[in-house]
Image (spheres, helix red, strand yellow):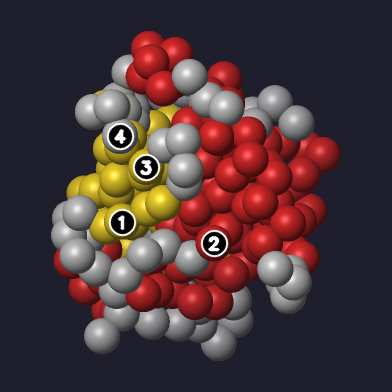
Amino acid sequence: MQVENHKEEVPFAHYEALFSQLDPQEAVNRLGDVSWDGQEFRLKLLGRGFAISHPVYGIRALDGGNLPPLPTQTFLLRYLLESKQVSWGGSWKTFREMPWGEMYITPYTGRVLTRAAFTFGTRIDDFRAACEKMGALALPHGDAGYQFDVLGGYQMQLLVWEGDEEFPPSAQVLYSDNFADGFAPEDRVVAGDILISTIKSNFK
């Protein structure tokens, strides 16, 4: 098959091949929140349940809705292959405060913080409605702020400030402290990207 989108399809194909060799029971023991019935893994991402077949990869949405885009599927494969169960210590960290955060902060700022600010800071009411639809927990921070269960015991908070004539809109993303040990820095970037895209997909 000819690969038409190298940016998305080549990484996916790489992890799909690794996934075929994964020991399902080892993954279940390592992650804790994932179930395995002998044919499929089951997990939840931002409140939506997915079943992922193994060893031949296939994914289906348990709610019958649309399948996630390929980068999100790659993120789930990397989660099954590389992540681990880490208890939340009760604190929140910015991306910069976690290991390798300083090295990745420039692409992270553009891909996540600036995107969130100008996507949601100009549409606060739509942002609130979408987050409520997703079942997120409202927070008393920012002009609007919500807390999300990402997957497993990993959580994120997204705070948005509306722009005005003097200042542009802004946003901040906070990660539960277990992200520091449970995810590689590039996956923390992708988690922010997935969160923004999922909220936006719930706009009216």
**CB atoms at circles 4 and 3 under 8 Å apart?**
yes
Q: Residues within 10 Å of mark 2 (few under 14, many from 20)?
A: few
The kind of secondary structure element at disc 2 is helix
Q: Which quadrant of the view contains residue 15?
A: top right
Cα distance, mark 3 to mark 1?
9 Å
Q: Residues within 10 Å of mark 1 (few under 14, many from 20)?
A: some
The kind of secondary structure element at disc 4 is loop
Q: Position of residue 147 (x, y in %)?
A: 31, 47
Sequence-first disc among 4 and 3: 4
**Residue at the disc numbered 2:** 70
Does 125 sit left or right of 158 as displayed? left
Q: Amino acid at mark 3?
A: Ser
Cα distance, mark 1 to mark 2?
13 Å
Q: Amino acid at mark 4?
A: Gln
User: Could you tell me which residue is drawn at 31 percent across and 70 percent down?
Assistant: 66
Q: Amino acid at mark 1?
A: Arg
